Image (spheres, rainbow, N blue to C red):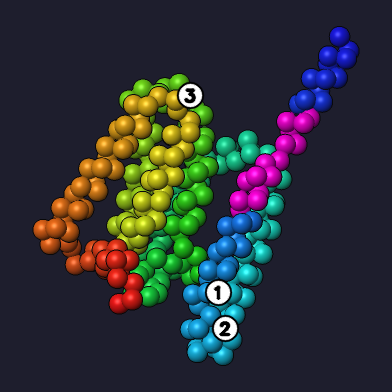
Amino acid sequence: MAGRRDGVRRQRTKQKFFFDYTLLFIVIFLICFGLVMLYSTSSYEANLDFGDSAFYLKKQIKATILGVIVMVIVACVDYHIWERFAMLAYIVSAVMIALVMTPLGYSANGARRWLNLGGMSLQPAEVAKVGMIIFFASLVCKMGTRIRNKKGFLFTVFWAVPISGEILIITSNLSSAIIIFGIVLMMLFVASPDYKGYVLGALCVIFVSAVMVLAIAKGIIPEDMSYRFSRIKAWLNPEA
């Protein structure tokens, strides 16, 4: 009996200190790949503007080092603790996006999406992505098996609509709005074994895509949306 207790204790200790090295490798690979791509695309312009082809690379490396430090600190914190801040994360995300409309917000490259916080710029949409992960992880756990039915699925998805809509309307950042909504759908995909929710989500995506394609074909695209579709068209003719 004592031996069995020791075995269970060792097993719990092993689970407690488990570290996903595969995930760590993927993160490191993406960081390195991103830095290489950044240098590849920015070296010529950086050399012309600043006389240093690695100007943007050095700037990004500093941000990367800071991000890695934060990542290590967060990884050392028991993830159950973050559940206490789930609703706070949701509220902070919504408030920070709204602050773009205040004097704290400023425009850059033709878009008003950033906050000036004491000389440091911050894009609220990026904060919202982390906030949504914390909030929906907690919400999915609280929903339990109720998330498997249509009503529970729609109730969970509903919470993503205000934040995605806020980002789209206030900051005109369509890509971030789609990413946040996609994060929620992927979390539901992982959390629920019921395929009804997946079919519903897929139908929504197909419907929206069909409407967009029809709008392009008919030429009924709002003026403020035209530059987004020009990005898609540019992919077909990158030399232009």
Q: Earlier in the sequence, mark 1 or mark 2?
A: 1
Which numbered tag is attached to residue 39?
1
Q: Name the mark on residue 53.
A: 2
User: Which image quadrant: the N terminus?
Assistant: top right
Looking at the rendered structure, the secondary structure element under dot 2 is loop
Q: Residue shown at 33%/44% (left/top)?
A: 161
Is residue 148 something one can see in this rendering? Answer: yes
Residue 158: x and y in percent read 34, 37
Disc nearer the start of the sequence (1/3): 1
If you read the primary sequence from the N terminus, does the residue marked by circle 2 or circle 3 appear first? Answer: 2
Give left or right: position of 96 versus 204: right
Mark nearer the viewer, 2 or 3: 2
Spatial CA distance of label 1 from label 2 is 8 Å
Query: Which of the two residues, 71 or 86, is positioned nearer the viewer here?
Result: 71
Crowdedness of circle 1 by 10 Å Cα count: few (<14), some, many (20+)? some
Q: Inspect the magenta stretch and tell me whether residue 30 lies in it.
A: no
Crowd around label 2: few <14 · some 14–19 · many ≥20 (10 Å) = some
- CB under 8 Å between discs 1 and 2: yes
Give the magenta range.
13-27
